[in-house]
Image: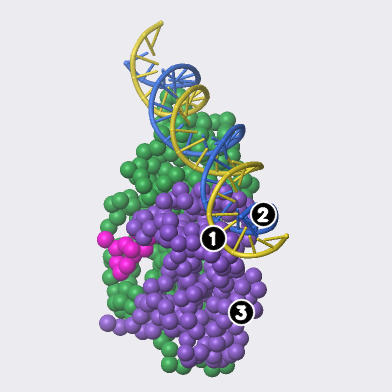
Chain colours: A purple, B green, C blue, D yellow
Amino acid sequence: MTRYSRQTRMLVAVDCIIFGFDGQDLKLLLIKRGFEPEKGKWSLMGGFVQPDEDLEQAAARTLTKLTGLDGVYMEQLGSFGHPGRDPMERTLSVAYFALIDINQYKQQITDEYKAEWFPLKDAPKLIFDHADMVEEAQARLRYKAAIHPLLFELLPTRFTIPQLQILFEAVYDAGFDKRNFSRKVLSTGLLVKQKEKERATSKRGAFYYKLDKRKYSAKFHAFLNFVSDPGNLK
Amino acid sequence: MTRYSRQTRMLVAVDCIIFGFDGQDLKLLLIKRGFEPEKGKWSLMGGFVQPDEDLEQAAARTLTKLTGLDGVYMEQLGSFGHPGRDPMERTLSVAYFALIDINQYKQQITDEYKAEWFPLKDAPKLIFDHADMVEEAQARLRYKAAIHPLLFELLPTRFTIPQLQILFEAVYDAGFDKRNFSRKVLSTGLLVKQKEKERATSKRGAFYYKLDKRKYSAKFHAFLNFVSDPGNLK
DNA sequence: AAATATAAATGTCAATTTTACAATTAATTT
DNA sequence: AAATTAATTGTAAAATTGACATTTATATTT
């Protein structure tokens, strides 16, 4: 077979918007870019799609290279293809956003990428159109987490209801009534109460919960309505 | 500036999943592919992204070339990049799905593409991974239309409540109670009752409605809950 | 040992929304 | 004038949501 003649080929990259939660704020994992152009500037972790690679593979490989983690929640955010987005050469980027348990993240031994967690609200200026990607990823996160049990991906296996609420409040930059919040969350039937309590943050201690894996898988795509009108919060 | 060395460039295409509604069934607009490979086979309308073009531009240009229409509802579905998806040469495709008023569609004078509308349920075998794209587009349509006032894009300016219901029933392949349906739809405040009636399909005739453009724009991204649990319909 | 302080957990009621189900109305056809 | 057909409107129970307060467990202080 021959090739399609008279058409332009271009580079295809993947970029990962990696979210984490430190118990207080939503964080973004960024790296210092190691090559020209824009060497030394803050950037999303990314890489070129290899000849034999699927897009998901490329994104997973890229994420693993930075975080050392496997089996992380990741979904395609969308593709960014403005002609001038990379001044060097036309490059299409397929953006993926990932949610990781920040405690699982280990600084790689070879700190090849000089990675750093930034509060989402206080992230540095990013190269190219990466700020657009981050903004779109945040919007997507808010959108999906309002309907689906997504934010659990940011928490450790065991977590308390108050911890979960702080996470929701960080994501939506809003306060929720704790009575209504816990009722709503528990009514999903997704949580299994543990015998142990978390004792660091209060005298009484808060019971740990774990996800019911079966129900979680089953209901992940259901419409659960965690936040009624996420577009209209104070 | 130099270029990124030792990286593979590839072709980037856009493909459009174009939905229409004929008053009864959900339809898909397909073309007979005009060049090798797979010449003469049924395919989504697509085209290569040009050197100076944004992705959205390429998709809009492609859609307009086939339908003659402008300002059509379109959104990026996602990118498909499996290495072997085009046997000729590695080609990434950014898929867009579009909703058009089928009555606005005019067969182009130069029937360059041999386009044809197919019932979604009875579409022919498609080239490459286009069937995957269609399936994903249908899932996205069902998902979004359950929450947002999206399906109006498939209807003419004036439409009746029964027509709207038939559309919803076609999209979800399910029956809805007409009393509850009309109440739900009218409660959005998006519809403006007209003085005229549609008289073709019933003795009594059904009142036409139009969209309140202001409210439609304002509430398009709000969570309106047209269909409570679209994943769990009979 | 008792009192205090703090955050967790639980409870109530009105308002709204959803669900299930039936009767009435407008206009053509018989 | 009666019959037919599809559009329109209605209603009551059930479930969900939203606003708001009290009780409870435990470490700390007196």
Q: Residue A79: image x %, image y %?
A: 48, 71
Assign a secondary structure to mark 2: loop
The mark lying in front, picked from 1 and 3, is 1
Prevailing SS of the magenta stretch: helix
Q: Which residue is at the front of the view, C7 or A110? A: C7
In the rendered image, residue A54 lying in the magenta stretch gets the answer: no
Circle 2 sits on which residue? Answer: A234
In the rendered image, residue B131 lying in the magenta stretch gets the answer: yes
Which residue is drawn at the image coordinates 36% and 55% (left, top)? A215
Q: Residue C4: image x %, image y %?
A: 70, 55
Circle 3 sits on which residue? Answer: A126
Q: Residue B137: image x %, image y %?
A: 40, 58
Assign a secondary structure to mark 3: loop
A176 relative position to B8: left or right: right
Q: Amino acid at mark 2?
A: Lys
Whichever of labels 1 and 2 marks the residue nearer the N terminus, that label is: 1
Using a 10 Å C-alpha cutoff, classify the residue at mark 3 as few (fewer than 14 neighbours), some (14 to 19) or many (20 or more): some
Which residue is drawn at the image coordinates 50% and 90% (left, top)? A112
Using a 10 Å C-alpha cutoff, classify the residue at mark 2 as few (fewer than 14 neighbours), some (14 to 19) or many (20 or more): few
The mark lying in front, picked from 3 and 2, is 2
Q: Is residue B205 above or below residue D2?
A: below
Residue A205's tag is: 1
Q: Residue A92: image x %, image y %?
A: 49, 78
Whichever of labels 1 and 3 marks the residue nearer the N terminus, that label is: 3
User: Disc 1 and disc 2: Cα gap in Å?
Assistant: 30 Å
| Residue segment shown in magenta | B125-139
